[in-house]
Amino acid sequence: MIAELGHLALVMALMMALLQAGFPLAGAAGGVPLWMAVARGAGRAQCFFLLAAFGCLAASFALNDFSVAYVAQHSNSALPLYYRLSAVWGGHEGSMLLWATILGLWTLAVTIFSRSLTEDFVARVLGVMGLVSIGILLFILLTSNPFERLAVPPADGNDLNPLLQDFGMTIHPPMLYMGYVGLSVAFSFAVAALLSGSLDAAWARWSRPWTLVAWTFLTAGITLGSWWAYYELGWGGWWFWDPVENASFMPWLVATALIHSLAVTEKRGAFKAWTVLLAIFAFSLSLLGTFLVRSGVLTSVHAFATDPARGLFILVLLGVVIGGSLMLYGLRAPAVRDNARYELVSRENLLLLNNVLLVTAAGSILLGTLYPLVVDALGLGKISVGPPYFDAVFAPVMAPVFLLAGTGLLFPWRSASLTAIARRTRWLALLSVTAGIVTMAVFWNLRDIKTFATITLAIWLVATAGYTLWSRVRLREHWLAGLRSQSRGVYGMTLAHAGLAVVLIGIALSGCYTVEKTVRLAPSETVTIGDYAFTFRGTTRVEGPNYTASQGEFAVRSGTREVILKPEKRAYRVQRNTMTEAAIDPGLTRDLYVALGEPMDNGAWSVRLYYKPFIRWIWLGGLCMALGGVLAASDKRYRVAARQKAALSAAPSSATA
Amino acid sequence: MRLTFLIPLVVFVLMVVLLGVGLTLNPREVPSPFIGKPAPAFSVPQLHAPDEALTSEVFRGQVSLLNVWASWCVSCRQEHPLLVELAKTDRVPIYGLNYKDERNAALEWLARLGNPYRSSAFDADGRIGIDWGVYGVPETFVIDRKGIIRHKFTGPLTREAIDDILLPLVQQLKGEPG
Amino acid sequence: MKRSVRACLLVLCCGCVPVASATEIRTFKDTTEQLRYEQLVEELRCLVCQNQSLADSDADLARDLRDEVYQIIRSGKSDEEAVQFLVERYGDFVLYRPPVKPMTWLLWLGPFLALAGGLLFIRSRTRQHAATRSPELNAAERERLRQLEGDTRK
């Protein structure tokens, strides 16, 4: 019964999406206020029905209704309630429903926080979001219905993949989807602006907070995913250039470019066409990521829904949404007037350079991801493009980004002098190089140029970001007044750039100075890494709710401090999977990481031990960037904009400036 | 100038076409670099006669198949009846490469399900498998009179694969001068 | 399984089980040799669990191939010989670092061509804009922004 209600709710949501797209878009085109007024109501109703459908699926999981095929595939009565609920998005159908539901939530948000926009603009934005929603809901209903019943329900379910039975994996998908789908708002704003022809600074002002919030979720989601991979996959890696990771990283890079480009469009009215294109790109890459993951065109262990029918459906959807918006762009963008004047060296061009670099980086990842497919499609054989390629291409393209990110505000709009900026920052450059050398000396490795360069870049980035803030603060007579006079946007930017530096430091130091040992350890044997002595105390059998584990006990001693680490090797009863649960002693300057390998004779085990310096900084930096996004999105001027009702309609009346 | 704004659309359309073609391809199948090259040499004990060696010389002078199999391999079981049937027609000799198996288990398996092989090489540690670029059992190689590998099937053979690809190829190879 | 099993949705391919693998205990002549071995198995792709390197895969074949690479390195042969050994048997597919040949020129040069194109784009736009003389935000736009900000700005 619950499942049928859920199914019904999905169908109702589709109806609402049809209303939300049809009437408002037609109304906006034909100037019919009554039709446009449908947008908000339909959007809210759609969100309601999606939440209802989602609730029904969650209830089916909570009640162990194994007559629902999806529940039977991804849950088990022995699975704790908490994981039964997160199992809602543990498979293909449910995660598509999560996607749709989150789109519903974003739609709801737009209906609420859009009072400052004109009616026809709101109608167009919500109409475009409705179109996207129609596509996704059709996809779910026609190819991936999570509410399908089994003719013969099994006694118990297949259980959730053990890798997903974890806190990080519980919140990672919703976060990531909030980001992916959030980019649909910026996309809809862009398409609405193209449709209405009102592509101006005000449009950029409205788009910015939405893009920032989506970017923040995306940043947090990627950071969480990386953290999860680190502790859950049992060997301490944190980024793999896997197609699925790339699918989330490409929209992030383009969204980052979009944030910067929107700033120029808002402040200077420049790059309008380019900014619109970026907004289209960012969401297109989110959709493309979905296609790549779901269609099975790429080998990825994640591509579990390798169903050609689904792949074809998403491809058509992709063609309609992206192709349609690019077509619209091709027709409307040439008419966009872009009058800003600026010199070669100016903040405008600095930000445009940032855009070119970020988009090139995203493009390289796309190229690397699709190249094997292209070669294969042309019948030229099979090749692989993996981490060595991405590392080799990504680093040189991104290096200038790190070099320039901190200096942004030192470049005035219109025209800047490189020599003046060089003079102002020369001491910072010296400081950065010195800091790089000192760091290398501390770790006793002066030969590794890559690490040296990364550290120097990171210090330079944080120093220039700090200096830029300070140079603005000191314009006031008192520094406190100066600090208070800075907007949250400036603080957000500084924090995000500093966060980037923190990530870089984490990457460089953990990459270069990690110590790894794979050893055979019998009970009471000790192995040392640096100052740390790991003593193996044997294993015990531990019974979990749906698994049996061998739990090792390691005493790690350093000076007088001793910690006990208990890594596990779990055998999940239903899925018949073995999982390594690493034990980690986390620290700001180093992690100690122990993972059990295979049992050997006489109670001995092969064991992997890691000493990973500064690895936590990678996620700490990601967190700083996300916080920076929150700060910037909460900037006063966006809230003011929201309160100024119908400012746009009043705009053309009195031009005093 | 107007046309430059259509470049993204053109690039995207190209990409969609390629992705569409990509949908029809199997990403897991890796072509063998051995096609057109001589069969890698080996000389190992036979499964049924541990004291006698089976060598790659056996492929010379006749069109033959080498089927890589193991008793632990689920999909080998799936294709096995087809191989037995094919062996009965006597249209092409089939040799086996018993890959990373236990001798008793393998013998028992053949005794139970029938033995389509003229002879099976016993590759206990999988070294020959590596030399032949085996990555997923079962695999089937088609070898011509000169001992050159002409085709490789990865994964279980199906009736269609045998009738539409394998047998016509064997027929064609038989017509080639030795 | 490590390397690729990420993100929210996954189902495991044939026989690949998510465990920390590659826990063979190996001895090397020196750390240089060890680093060579570790880097090699990182850059070679497992044919069974296709989205993992040899280093990360727990598949039986990956284990065997690691052994082969280990033997080759230990016997004093070069990295190229080890790579050659695998490419002869499995083709370019095993290389996570695609070899530079006409077929991959676009792959390797593409990003840098795009970058060069982008820089030219910046240059051409700048000229164009330095030449125009009209105000960057037109009066109406400025007025709209002013209204959006209300009276909060002094």
Image (spheres, coloured by chain):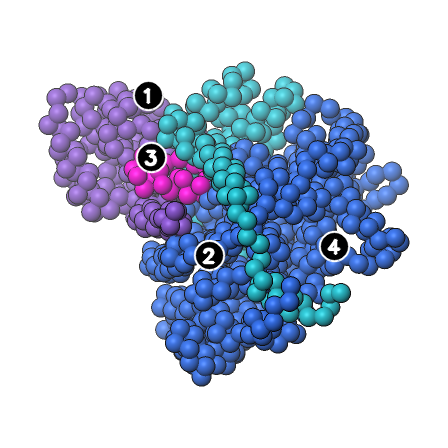
CB contact under 8 Å: marks 4 and 3: no
Q: Amino acid at mark 2?
A: Val
Please rate how many residues cluster around mark 1, counting C-alpha atoms within 10 Å: few if below 14, some from 14 to 19, many from 20: few
Mark 4 falls on what kind of element?
helix
Residue topped by disc 3: A381
Badge 2: chain ID = A
Disc 3: which chain?
Answer: A
**What residue does disc 1 label?**
B41
Callout 4 touching callout 2 (CB < 8 Å): no
* Distance between the alpha carbons at the discs numbered 2 and 3: 44 Å
* Residue A381: x %, y % from top left: 33, 35
Labelled pair 2, 3 in contact (Cβ < 8 Å) = no
Q: Position of residue A200 (x, y in %)?
A: 53, 61
Chain coloured purple in this rendering: B
Residue A413 shows up from this direction? yes
Q: How many marks?
A: 4
Expressed as whole percent of the image width and height from the top left, the position of residue A496 reads 69, 51
Which is in the foreground here, disc 4 or disc 3?
Answer: 4
Camera-side residue of A576 and C148: C148
Tell me the tag on residue A336: 2
